[in-house]
Image: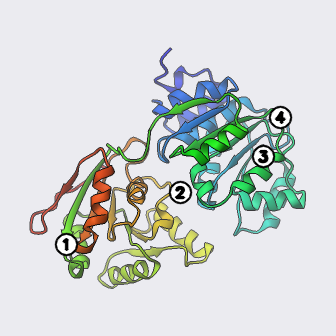
C-alpha cells in the first residue's frame, strides 16, 4: 500500500493529534519509506539531507513504540552539534505533546547541574551530543540500560568531527537488542562501516543519492570583479528586497568585516562563526530564527546543522574551496518542500572552484549579468 498521508499510517490517536497540530498532512519521501519499517522494529539506514522531514521519520515511530508509563530513558538520539540537539528535541517534544513523553536535549555549553536535575526527574527520550552524553555516563547521572531505540542522526557529520570512538563507547552502554537507525546525507565507506557494526539486517532507504540535485532551489551566479563584490551584494539585497538570508564567507575575519560593513550601510546583519562563544552564537541564531535579524553572515560552521525555516535566499559572497560545501550551504534554504534562491558572487580568481561546482550539479546554475536587473525572487 502506497503511503501518501500521515492519516494512512497506523498511529495512536495521541500521536496523530500531535502531528496534525503541527500542520503535517502529506508525507515527504523519507517519511513515506522509513516510518513503516521503523514501526515494525526494523533497523534502518536512511540517506536524506537535512530539511527533508527525517526528524519526523524517526521521531514518530519512536514515540509510537515507546511506553510513557515507564520512567526511564528508552529513546536515544545522537546529534553532532548542540544546535541540532536542541532542534530535534523540540521537534520530538512537539510530536509527542499528547503522548506524555519527556524529551531532554543534552549538550555541552549548558550547566550540567541543570541537566542532572532534569534527568533525576525522569526522562523518556534523550537527544544529545556525544561528548556531553559520555560526561553524564561517567558521572552515572545517565543510565542507558533501558534504551529500546537508538538513532544516529547526521552520521557522516559525526564521523567527520571525529566522534567514532565516542559513538562506540555510548552504544556499548545500550542494550544489544535495541532497534538502531542511522540517517546521513552521504553514505560513504566510513558510514557503512558503522552500519555493518551496529545495525542488524537494516532496511536501506536512499531517498536522495546526494545533495547535488536540489531542484527546489533556483540557482544563479554572477562573475564579478572582487573589488566590486560589496556594492554588487548591496544592489542584490536592495533590488530583490531580501528580508531573510544567510550570506556565506570563507573565513571568520571576512565574515566579521562583511557584517560590520553591512551594518554600517544600514542593513540588519550580524556575523556567525566558530570564533564566538557558545552563548554569543546562540544569541545570534535565536534572533535569526525568531525573525528579529534579517541577515546572518556566516562561515561554513552554519552550512550544515542549522535548520531554520523561512530562509528565502542563500548568498555565496565567497565561493567555497570544497565544491560539496556549496550544496551544503544552499541546502539551508528550500526547507520542508518550500522554494528558495541561491546567488553566488564569483570573483575572477574563483572561476576554477565554481567550475568544479558546475561540473557536479545536475541542476542549472543560471548566469546573471552585472548590468541586468537581477530578478531572483523566491517563494518564502
Q: Are marks 3 and 1 in contact (CB under 8 Å)?
A: no
Q: Which residue is mark 4?
A: 69
Q: Which residue is mark 1?
A: 224
* Front tag of 4 and 3: 3
Q: Earlier in the sequence, mark 4 or mark 2?
A: 4
Q: Which residue is mark 3?
A: 171
Q: Are marks 1 and 4 in contact (CB under 8 Å)?
A: no
Q: Which residue is mark 2?
A: 305
Q: Residue at x 29, y 62 (%)?
A: 354
SS at mark 1 in the image:
strand
Crowd tier of the residue under label 2, counting other residues whose Cα lies within 10 Å: few below 14, some 14–19, many 20 or above: many
Q: Kindly give the residue lying farthest to the left in the view shown.
A: 371
Spatial CA distance of label 3 from label 1 is 50 Å
Could you tell whether 370 is left or right of 151 in the image? left
SS at mark 2 in the image:
loop
* Front tag of 2 and 1: 1
Q: Residue 117 lies in what quarter of the image? A: bottom right
Q: Earlier in the sequence, mark 4 or mark 3?
A: 4
Q: Position of residue 46 (x, y in %)?
A: 56, 37
Amino acid at each position: 500500500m502506497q503511503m501518501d498521508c500521515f492519516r494512512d499510517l497506523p498511529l495512536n490517536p495521541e500521536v496523530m493529534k500531535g502531528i496534525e497540530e503541527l500542520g503535517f498532512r502529506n508525507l515527504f519521501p523519507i517519511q513515506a519509506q522509513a516510518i513503516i519499517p521503523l514501526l515494525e522494529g526494523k533497523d534502518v539506514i536512511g540517506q536524506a539531507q537535512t530539511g527533508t522531514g527525517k526528524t519526523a521519520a524517526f521521531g514518530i515511530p519512536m514515540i509510537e513504540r515507546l511506553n510513557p508509563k515507564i520512567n526511564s530513558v528508552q529513546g536515544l538520539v545522537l546529534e553532532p552539534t548542540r544546535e541540532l540537539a536542541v532542534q530535534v528535541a523540540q521537534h520530538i517534544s512537539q510530536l509527542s505533546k499528547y503522548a506524555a513523553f519527556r524529551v531532554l536535549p543534552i549538550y555541552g555549553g549548558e550547566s550540567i547541574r541543570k541537566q542532572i536535575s532534569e534527568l533525576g526527574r525522569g526522562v523518556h527520550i534523550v537527544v544529545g551530543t556525544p561528548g556531553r552524553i559520555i560526561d553524564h555516563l561517567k558521572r552515572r547521572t545517565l543510565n542507558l540500560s533501558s534504551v529500546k531505540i537508538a538513532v544516529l542522526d547526521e552520521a557522516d557529520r559525526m564521523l567527520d568531527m571525529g566522534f567514532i570512538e565516542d559513538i562506540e563507547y555510548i552504544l556499548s552502554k545500550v542494550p544489544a537488542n535495541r532497534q538502531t537507525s542511522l540517517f546521513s546525507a552521504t553514505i560513504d565507506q566510513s558510514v557503512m562501516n558503522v552500519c555493518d557494526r551496529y545495525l542488524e539486517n537494516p532496511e536501506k532507504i536512499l531517498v536522495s543519492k546526494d545533495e547535488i540535485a536540489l531542484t527546489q532551489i533556483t540557482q544563479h551566479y554572477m562573475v564579478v570583479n572582487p573589488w566590486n563584490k560589496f556594492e554588487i551584494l548591496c544592489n542584490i539585497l536592495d533590488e530583490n528586497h531580501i528580508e531573510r538570508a544567510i550570506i556565506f564567507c570563507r573565513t571568520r575575519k571576512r565574515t566579521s568585516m562583511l557584517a560590520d560593513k553591512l551594518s554600517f550601510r544600514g542593513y540588519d546583519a550580524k556575523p556567525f562563526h566558530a570564533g564566538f562563544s557558545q552563548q554569543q552564537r546562540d544569541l545570534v541564531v535565536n534572533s535569526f530564527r525568531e525573525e528579529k535579524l534579517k541577515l546572518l553572515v556566516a562561515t561554513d560552521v552554519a552550512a550544515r546543522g542549522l535548520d531554520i525555516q523561512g530562509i528565502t535566499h542563500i548568498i555565496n559572497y565567497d565561493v567555497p574551496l570544497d565544491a560539496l560545501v556549496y550544496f551544503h550551504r544552499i541546502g539551508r534554504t528550500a526547507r520542508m518542500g518550500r522554494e528558495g534562491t541561491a546567488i553566488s558572487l564569483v570573483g575572477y580568481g574563483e572561476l576554477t572552484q565554481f567550475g568544479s561546482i558546475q561540473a557536479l550539479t545536475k541542476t542549472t546554475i543560471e548566469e546573471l549579468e552585472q548590468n541586468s536587473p537581477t530578478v531572483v525572487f523566491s517563494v518564502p
